[in-house]
Image (tube, rainbow, N blue to C red):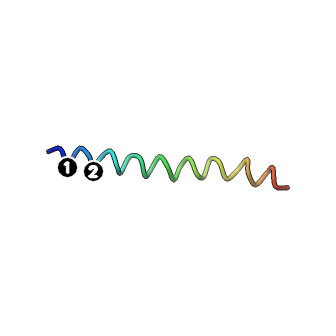
Amino acid sequence: MVSLIALVIVAAVTVFGTNAVHLFEVPSSAFHL
């Protein structure tokens, strides 16, 4: 049960991490212009 909760947390963190990276890529590319 605990492993299942940990798996869900890890999955949510990875999804949020990829979304954060895409959000930060837009201003960084604009600043590099």
Which kind of residue does numbered mark 2 sit on?
Leu
Q: Residues within 10 Å of mark 2 (few under 14, many from 20)?
A: few
Q: What residue is rendered at 17% in x and 44% in y?
A: 2
Q: What residue is rendered at 44% in x and 51% in y?
A: 15
> Which x, y percent locates residue 6?
26, 46
Q: Residues within 10 Å of mark 1 (few under 14, many from 20)?
A: few
> Which x, y percent locates residue 10?
34, 49
> Which x, y percent locates residue 3?
19, 49
Residue where numbered disc 2 is placed: 7
Image quadrant occupied by the N terminus: top left
In this picture, residue 27 sits left or right of residue 12: right
In this picture, residue 26 sits left or right of residue 16: right
Q: Secondary structure at mark 1?
A: helix
Q: Nearer the viewer, residue 10 or 19?
A: 10
Query: Which residue ends up furthest to the left in the rendered image?
Result: 1
Residue where numbered disc 1 is placed: 3
Which kind of residue does numbered mark 1 sit on?
Ser
Q: Secondary structure at mark 2?
A: helix
In this picture, residue 28 sits left or right of residue 7: right
Say whether marks 1 and 2 touch (CB < 8 Å).
yes
- Number of marks in the rendered image: 2
Image quadrant occupied by the C terminus: bottom right
Q: What residue is rendered at 79% in x and 51% in y?
A: 30
Q: What residue is rendered at 73% in x and 47% in y?
A: 27
Q: Nearer the viewer, residue 12 or 3?
A: 3
